[in-house]
Amino acid sequence: MDLVKSHLMYAVREEVEVLKEQIKELIEKNSQLEQENNLLKTLASPEQLAQFQAQLQTGSPPATTQPQGSTQPPAQPASQGSGPTA
């Protein structure tokens, strides 16, 4: 009986360690997403913020329009990829 108890205790300890690690990773991810959200809020125009607030109130999905300047970043990696790779 003690063998079963010790085995269960060991399994529970291992699971607790795994869950602690997952919690740590989720806290870090949450912090990163909060920072990204704050950055996006500061960079968004008042019109974009108003549109977003309206979408939240109506429950409609966000529009698929891209913010200004978002069409150029995909072009840059393509031009970088055309050069020789070492």
Image (cartoon, helix red, strand yellow):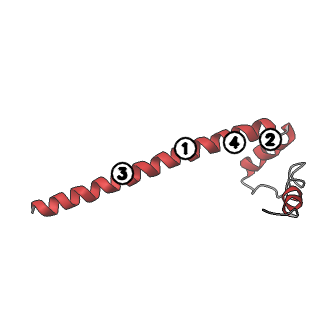
Residue at which label 4 appears = 37
Q: Is residue 57 above or below residue 35?
A: below
Q: Do callouts 1 and 4 mark residues in contact (Cβ within 8 Å)?
A: no
Q: Nearer the viewer, mark 2 or mark 4?
A: 4
> Which residue sits at x=64%, y=41%?
34
Q: Is residue 78 left or right of residue 12?
A: right
Sooner in the amino-acid sequence: mark 1 or mark 2: 1
Sooner in the amino-acid sequence: mark 2 or mark 4: 4
Q: Is residue 76 left or right of residue 34?
A: right
Residue at which label 2 appears = 49
Q: How far apart are the two marked residues, 1 and 3, measured between alpha carbons?
A: 17 Å
Q: Given the image, on which type of amino acid does mark 2 rest?
A: Leu
Residue at which label 3 appears = 17
Q: Secondary structure at mark 3?
A: helix
> Which residue sits at x=17%, y=58%?
6
Quadrant containing the C terminus in the rendered view? bottom right
Label 1 environment density (alpha carbons within 10 Å; few <14, some 14–19, many ≥20)? few
Residue at which label 1 appears = 28
Spot occupied by residue 11 in the image (x, y as percentages of width and height): 27, 59
Q: Do callouts 2 and 4 mark residues in contact (Cβ within 8 Å)?
A: no
Label 2 environment density (alpha carbons within 10 Å; few <14, some 14–19, many ≥20)? some
> Which residue sits at x=36%, y=51%?
17
